[in-house]
Amino acid sequence: MSKQRVTRRQFLNYTLTGVGGFMAAGMLMPMVRFAVDPVLKHNPAGDFIVTDKKISDITNEPVRVDFSFEQQDAWYTAEVTNTAWVYKDDKGEIVALSPVCKHLGCTVDWNTDKANPEHFFCPCHNGLYTKDGTNVPGTPPSAPLDVYPYKEVDGYLALGKAAPRKEA
Amino acid sequence: MKWVAKDIEVYLGAKEYVDTVVLPLLPVSFADDIKQTASMTEFITLLSGQLERQFKGRLLMLPGFSYIKTESEEKLLETVNHWGAEFVKQGFKHVFFVTSDSDWKAREDKLDGSLIWLPFLPLEHMDKNYLNSILEDQVKQMISLFIKKWQDRDSQ
Ligand code: FES
């Protein structure tokens, strides 16, 4: 007489806890996944973004190239627009400079200061940079403009993430 | 610079370079002009963002001042001028108020600071590319306005 009978109550108890457990797991899993998702997903930054500028259209006169992409910042996705000043140097190499002034972050413009033609000019505190992005001593900026790495994709210019220039 | 902790830290270390402060004036109404006031607020917020990006190192962009349209003109002027007085006390040389609300246009001469009034665009009906080019235009106009005001002041 060792065999215990499972009563109806016990049976119901076991089954309901079991089903309830499954249901709870079913609800919780997506929540947990949602919570840790941004951590698991790899960050797309660092990838190159294709602009609408044709490589063959780039001359030795700097032009503004705007490009937008979705930036994912943990849970928050935003469309950001970045700008680059793009031209070909004397050797025919493409140069893509960030327009963000190294002093306090205003946006620099090409050739807008009458006293200093052929320079990048920052209207905020008269910061000056030569065409290759080198800061002119005696003006507030203390470093050259950041440089975008670039690639060619089907004849179009693709830009990466701007970084400080390597050589001093 | 924006009103966020990171930017304010930079501001505190570089106060002498930040001589301009901008306060957006954002109307709120629940009457017939409810949609318009929403559009105005949306438009000015977007534009201020662009402006801030352009002149990050020289201007402090404050969070907008929102007010209810039923408020009396007297009281609104008092409040906004109180802000203005505080800016001057803090050493800002250029004080700008930006808005789409045309009521401010009528009170412009009673305002302690420069008013930049721009007619709002109904953003919700616009094609994105078209919108961008229009916005760019507006921002360019604002940029030259700022530069002009700065130059006028510097040459005084
Ligand atoms: S932010 Fe460009 S010179 Fe100061």
Image (cartoon, helix red, strand yellow):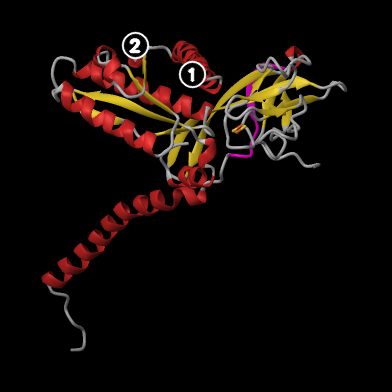
Helix, strand or loop under label 2 = loop
In front of the other: A108 or A66: A108
Nearest-to-viewer mark from 2 and 1: 1
Ligand 1's quadrant is: top right
Please report the residue visible at 40 percent of the width from the left and 39 percent of the height from the top: B90
In front of the other: B137 or B112: B112
Helix, strand or loop under label 1 = helix
Position of residue B112 measured from the top left corner of the image (x, y, whole percent):
32, 24
Vertical arrangement, residue B85 with respect to residue B103, above or below: below
Position of residue A51 measured from the top left corner of the image (x, y, whole percent):
63, 22
Instruction: Read off the magenta span.
Output: A45-54
Report which residue position mark 2 lands on: B119
Magenta stretch secondary structure, dominant: strand
Identity of the residue furthest to the front in this view: B156
Q: Are marks 2 and 1 in contact (CB under 8 Å)?
A: no
Cα–Cα span, label 2 and label 1: 20 Å
Please report the residue visible at 33 percent of the width from the left and 37 percent of the height from the top: B86
- Which of the labelled discs sits on residue B149, or is there none? 1
Identity of the residue furthest to the right in this view: A91
Vertical arrangement, residue A8 with respect to residue A79, above or below: below
Q: Earlier along the polypeptide chain: callout 2 or callout 1?
A: 2
Please report the residue visible at 79 percent of the width from the left and 16 percent of the height from the top: A60
Please report the residue visible at 70 percent of the width from the left and 28 percent of the height from the top: A128
Position of residue A70 measured from the top left corner of the image (x, y, whole percent):
51, 32
Are both tags, 2 and 1, on one chain?
yes
**Whether residue B58 can be seen here:** yes
- Which of the labelled discs sits on residue A2, or is there none? none
Please name the amino acid that badge 2 sits on. Pro
In front of the other: A128 or A71: A128
Position of residue B45 measured from the top left corner of the image (x, y, whole percent):
37, 26
